[in-house]
Amino acid sequence: MIRVQAAPLDIPGELADFARDRTDIGAVASFVGLVRADHAGLPVTAMTLEHYPGMTERQLGVVEAEARRRWPLQDSLVVHRVGRMMPGEAIVLVATASAHRRAALDACSFLIDWLKTDAPFWKLEETPDGERWVEARAEDDAARARWAATAP
Amino acid sequence: MRIRYFAWLKHRVGCAEEVLEPPAEVATLATLKLWLAERHPGFAEALASPGVVRCAVNQEYVPEDVPLRPGDEVAFFPPVTGG
C-alpha cells in the first residue's frame, strides 16, 4: 500500500496495523527516515517536502510492484509525509512482510533505495542562513544501481 | 500542452506551471527543452549543467526522443531528494 500525507506519521500505529491477524508471516522489516537537526555543516530548524502529486503515487506504485515482483512478500507499505516538518519527525515509513527475514529485509532496503532516486520529492531546509534545497547525493544513485546489478 | 516545474527550477523559470502551444516542429522532449530555454533564460542556465534537469511526460520517466502530443503534461525538475 502507498500513501502520501501531510499529517505526522503514526509509526507505532502503522506497524501495529501492518500484517495484523496474519499467521503466514514470519518476518516484518521496517525503515523510518527522520528529519535531522543538522546537514552539510548547518543546523536545520525545519524541512519542507515538496512533491509532484499524482506522479509521486504512480512512481511509488512502480517501485512497490517491482519489490513484489522480486521478493515473495505477503504485504508492503510505503507512507511518505509531505509539507513542513521539524527535526526528529518521521519523513517516511517503509515496511515489508514475508515468510522469512531475508526477503523482508532485502525488499525493505530495496524500496527505500529506489524511492530515493525515483519518487518525485524535494527537500527544502530552513537554516540560520536561510532556505536551501537539498542536493541529490551520488551515493543514492549508487545504492539504486546496486539493486539493478543483483536483480533476481 | 501543460508544462510544470518543481523545486528550485520553478523559481529559476519564474512559474510553477504554464499552458503553451509549441509550434509543430517542437515534436519531442529534446526539442521542447530547447524551445523552453529560449523563453526562459533561467531554464537555459539550468539545462547547461548536465544531469540537473530531469523530465517526465504524463507523470512517467521517458526517453528524450519520445514524441509529444498537444494534451501532454510535461514536467521538469531537479534530481529528487525524498525519503
Image (spheres, coloured by chain):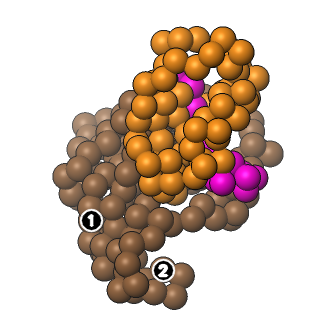
Q: Answer whether labels 2 and 1 touch (C-beta < 8 Å).
A: no
Quick one: quadrant of the N terminus of chain A? top left
Q: Quarter of the image containing the C terminus of chain A? A: top right
Q: Is residue B43 visible?
A: yes
Find numbered disc 1 in the image and state the secondary structure of the residue it sits on. Answer: strand
Position of residue A8 in the picture relative to residue A69 (left or right): left
Residue B82 is at least partly visible in this image: no
**Residue placed under numbered mark 2 in the picture:** A39
Q: Colour of chain B?
A: orange
Work out whether A131 lies above or below A149: below
Say above or below: A102 vs B24: below
**In the image, residue B48 lies in the stretch drawn in magenta:** yes
Q: Residues within 10 Å of mark 1 (few under 14, many from 20)?
A: many
- Which chain is drawn using brown? A
Query: Which chain is indicated by disc 1?
Result: A
Coordinates of residue A61 in the picture (x, y in percent): 47, 31
Give the labeled residue for mark 1: A85
Mark identifier at residue A120: none
What's the distance in space between the residues labelled 2 and 1, CA to CA?
A: 15 Å
Q: Position of residue A110 (x, y in %)?
A: 59, 48
Residue type highlighted by circle 2: His
Query: Helix, strand, or loop for circle 2?
Result: strand
Q: Check disc 1 and give the amino acid type.
A: Met
Q: Number of callouts in the render?
A: 2
Chain letter for mark 2: A
Residue at 48% in and 12% down:
B71
